[in-house]
Amino acid sequence: MNHGSIIANGQPVETSLPCTIEEFLVVQKLLPRSVVVEHNGEAVAPSEFAVRSLAPGDRLEIVRIVAGG
């Protein structure tokens, strides 16, 4: 594995690449079931988190789902 940088919510984040979205979320201490993810402008279904790979320079938008009302 190599270290590389992706952009998460507008901020560069160093991470081990290649990795999946799920692996990245776990390293960032985010529960994959508690977030909505957009990868390079495309919404990603939670079922794809474990198979969608990240590459250097990729952009993620990660939004936490907040329950309640």
Image: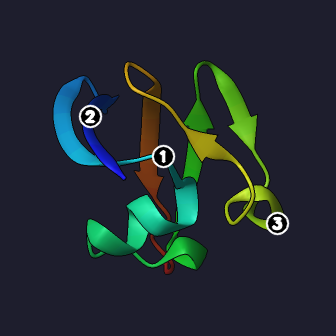
- Residue type, numbered disc 1: Pro
Q: Image height check: is 22 above or below 3?
A: below
61 vs 27, left or right, is: right
Mark 3: give few (<14), some (14-19) or many (20+) Cα within 10 Å: few
Residue 4, numbered label: 2
Mark 2: give few (<14), some (14-19) or many (20+) Cα within 10 Å: some
Q: Mark 1 sits on what residue?
A: 18
Q: Mark 3 sits on what residue?
A: 47
| Gap between marks 3 and 1 measured at Cα | 19 Å
Q: Nearer the viewer, residue 53 or 12?
A: 53
Q: How far from the left and from the top, in percent, is residue 25?
A: 41, 64
Q: Nearer the viewer, mark 2 or mark 3?
A: 2
For label 3, the SS is helix
Q: Nearer the viewer, mark 3 or mark 1?
A: 1
Q: Residue at x 67, y 60 (%)?
A: 49
Q: Image height check: is 58 above or below 8?
A: above
- Residue type, numbered disc 3: Ser
> In the rendered structure, which disc, 1 or 2, sits on the residue that comes first in sequence?
2
24 vs 34, left or right, is: left
